[in-house]
Amino acid sequence: MLRLIICFLLLLLLDSCFKKGEDDPFVSLRTRKDRVAGKWRVTSINKVDSTSYGDGSQVNKWFYKLNEGEYIDSYVYVLNYQVREIRVKKGKRILYYEFEKNRGYRMYDYTDSDTTIVKGKWTFNDKSEYVKKKIGIYIYPSEAYSTNLFFDGTRTSYLLSGGQYLCNIRELRHKKMVWEDFYEYKPDVSGTSFTTAKSNSVVTLEPR
């Protein structure tokens, strides 16, 4: 009986050590929880958002790129298949995440214009039918602090309710983590009158 219990526990442990994400190592001596836990610095973000209206003649696109603390945020407005407006914003951004083994969670986001700090709990999103087990991370933020440096520099805090889906982990190693997300949303479908929103982002993190 003792051997069966030991074998069962070993299987549970190994299940968390084998490859889950697309670019994961085949096997790791550390569980996924242990690999996620720690302080992480975002080294790069590549994100594309787009919104199309009606027959597709109007498309808005947002391109966001962060590389080692420098970001470029671009917006392209297209109407009747012609580019009408392009806006580009550049600046500095430092983004950190902290995942504790006891499921504590913190996010620190510093830019030229504001500071945001979020605190709460995290867990693997094992219940989603769209996400493979132990791939998605779900956070339960309890409060957030934000300081807008454009105005008087005061800090405001507010409580957040409900959970937030943070990411799908494509690659999880001892010294590297890569997130990827994609969603497509089609509300108000009525004939050719509809809006389609798409977003795709890839985030690369390294130990802080």
Image (cartoon, rainbow, N blue to C red):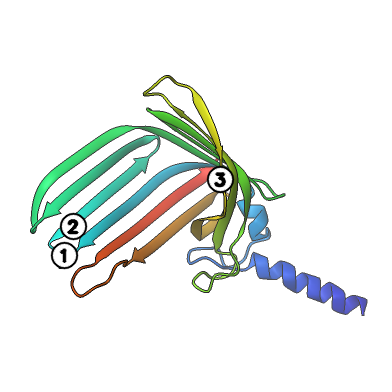
For this view, does 144 lie left or right of residue 93? Answer: right
Q: Position of residue 61 (x, y in %)?
A: 23, 52
Task: Name the element at disc 2.
Answer: strand
Tag 2 near tag 1, CB within 8 Å: yes
Residue denoted by label 2:
59
Tag 3 near tag 2, CB within 8 Å: no
Tag 1 near tag 3, CB within 8 Å: no
Q: Quadrant of the N terminus?
A: bottom right
Task: Name the element at disc 3.
Answer: loop
Instruction: Tell me what residue is drawn at x 57 percent, y 57 percent.
Output: 138
Residue denoted by label 1:
56
* Disc 2: CA contacts within 10 A as few (<14), some (14-19) or many (>=20): many
Residue 195 in view (yes/no): yes
Q: Nearer the viewer, residue 76 or 91?
A: 76
Outermost residue to the top? 152
User: Counting residues from the N terminus, which is met first, the one under dot 3 or under dot 2?
Assistant: 2
Identified by mark 2, the residue type is: Val
Q: Position of residue 176 (x, y in %)?
A: 52, 50
Query: Could you tell me how far apart the alpha carbons at marks 2 and 1 are, in whole angstroms?
Result: 6 Å
Identified by mark 3, the residue type is: Leu
For this view, does 83 lie left or right of residue 16? Answer: left
Residue denoted by label 3:
160
Task: Name the element at disc 1.
Answer: loop
Instruction: Tell me what residue is drawn at x 58 percent, y 40 percent.
Output: 143
Identified by mark 1, the residue type is: Gly
Q: Position of residue 149 (x, y in %)?
A: 41, 24
For discs 3 and 2, the disc positioned in front in the rendered view: 3
Instruction: Tell me what residue is drawn at x 27 percent, y 48 percent.
Output: 63
Q: Which mark is residue 198?
A: none
